[in-house]
Amino acid sequence: MKQTLLSLSNLSKQFSGKTVLDGLDLEILDGEFITLLGPSGCGKTTLLRLMAGFEHPDKGSITLAGQDLTHTTPENRPLNTVFQHYALFPHMSVFDNVAYGLKMEKRPKGEIRQRVEDVLAMVQLQDFAQRKPHQLSGGQQQRVAIARAVVKRPRLLLLDEPLSALDFKLRRTMQVELKRLQRELGITFVFVTHDQEEALSMSDRVVVLKDGLVQQLGTPREVYERPANLFTARFVGETNFFPGTVDSVHDGSITVDVFGLKRTLRRPDFPVREGQKLHVLLRPEDIRVLDPADEHGVAGKIVERNYKGSTLDSVIHLTDGTEVLASEFFDEDDPAFDYRLGEPVKVSWVDGWEWLLPEEVAPEQSEEEFPADA
Amino acid sequence: MSRWLPRIYLTLVYILIYVPIVVLVVFSFNESRTGYSWGGLGLRWYESLFDNRAMVGAMWNSLWLALSAATVSTVIGALTALALHRYRFRGKKLLNGMLFVVMMSPEIVLAISLLALFLLVGLQLGYVSLLLAHVTFCLPFVVITVMARLSGFDESLPEAARDLGASDFTMTRTVLIPVIMPALLAGWLLGFTLSLDDVVVSTFVSGPGYEILPLRIYSMVRVGLKPEVNALGTLLLVFSLVMLMLSQWILIRSKR
């Protein structure tokens, strides 16, 4: 069982009357890679700045390994930050940038030299020590920023969207590199991002934030497969929402009417009663596209198909107008498998792969705040 | 024809601007006793310029005044700009506006009001009164130069320094000041130049004990110009060219 390293309790923060964080509680465990995920304006950056000490909470407390940090200045906190745009000192060489934190600790010269060289070797920049930041590429600057923060051997490393300025390929490389660094150093990483793919692939745990409140806290698998509410379901990955009505409630299962199909599904954790409306959530990869002659499934037709290399993604319009996203892996027996536009199909799924959520009050609101591209 | 017209026009403009300067430089090396006929090359007027005790004295006074006024106004101006940039305080807008008032108001108004102030408080007119006056009119230029640099300043730099363990003071010394150094130098040079060739304000607030170059030259005009002035003009021209190149060099280096 991992111990709590940083504990945030009842944190509230307002900026000129606007509430950014509202009584937020969070426990960060020692040695974990935890990601704060949410759309812009959800409070994730503010949360990070509170941890770093650049802002102070209006209410609540921050404790690191039993020590109260709520009113400690940034320079006296045993944690370091990797900034979104790196914030390298432009007038200093790479070596001096990395050595800065150790000079502030008044370490002996020999030790500084040794530690800076070690950490530069770790990020594969040992040959660039005398360069100035503007002579480096984006990815190299990024690595200097990480080296500068970890050379102080902090208990906790805060990373504020550190990969957002990099191009796609470099981003992938840096994701792997960051994971490797985290394993090697054993430092707790608090990573802020609005990219859900990044969050799922890198983290031990994900915190989904919206309007300064934790929507869900769990492993990437939990967040993806068992979203706590509609917001998380919409934000993390693509989801099909089918409207369902509870037909009858049994011991371990319920019968739900979806598009006229009576399906017997696993009974959810929340209370259900007959006649209740609920959402049946299905990820595109859970959808089964069947032959139109099949007696199971809902009728529809293909309106779009996208070849994605390993999968074939299609958009299907059901007869009532509902749009369904399906993502199917290529079958080895049928590598030429494809659809034509307008082709009639039937849509179904394997019982048990769905996830049920109760109806929420005004669920449309969150959809508007949050366009599909996020 | 239409192709030549713009060229002729441009040539005329350049002649109008640069011929007097060239004539001044050439005639500063004239050996002739009168200023209007050519008597061969020589350094006669430079010798007589440096033999003119009053003139050399005024030159040193001017340089010393410009040096001290530029330095004082850079220090005060940089601190003002930092305060305006970093903090929110009462009267911030007022302070900002007042700087512009100083910059925009006619020099004669500034001169009269400063003279009235100095007389009122009983300050002896001389070096101190000149320094105070020059700092006053240099200050807004320094503040604006430094503010411009600060507005493009990455706000996460000071935070990064604090995060790595620097106190506010250490951060200012090791990160903030080095990053805005080009603006400080540019502001200093601007102040130096403004102070060196100021006539209007200086006329009002200088005293008999401390004569400066522009006023000395102005008084020479009234008793009749000697070709020494050509030599002096050439020296000032070379000096300002060097300063201009220096400031450009700093600017280019800082952009890298």
Image (cartoon, rainbow, N blue to C red):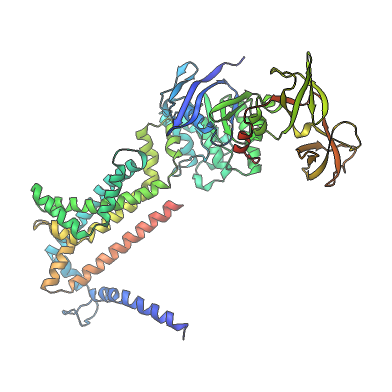
Percent x, y of residue B150: 39, 46
Left/right of residue B190 with respect to residue A107 in the rendered view:
left
Q: How many marks?
A: 0
Q: Is residue A164 above or below residue B211?
A: above
Quadrant of the drawing holding the C terminus of chain A: top right
Percent x, y of residue B142: 30, 51
Of residues B41 and A353, the one drawn nearer to the viewer in this rendering: A353
Percent x, y of residue A186: 58, 24
What's the residue at 26%, 53% (across, down)? B101
Query: Residue farthest to the bottom?
Result: B1
What's the residue at 30%, 55% (across, down)? B189
Percent x, y of residue A63: 48, 19
Of residues A23 and A34, the one drawn nearer to the viewer in this rendering: A23
Left/right of residue A177 with respect to residue B233 in the rendered view:
right
Whether residue B40 is visible, yes or no, is yes
Which corner quadrant of the image does residue A328 belong to?
top right
Query: Residue farthest to the front?
Result: A275
Q: Is residue A254 above or below residue B218?
A: above
Q: Is residue B91 above or below residue B4?
A: above
Left/right of residue B28 with respect to residue A236 in the rendered view:
left
Whether residue A313 is visible, yes or no, is no
Which corner quadrant of the image does residue A278 belong to?
top right
Which corner quadrant of the image does residue A100 belong to?
top left
Quadrant of the drawing holding the N terminus of chain A: top right
Q: Is residue B171 above or below residue B101?
A: above
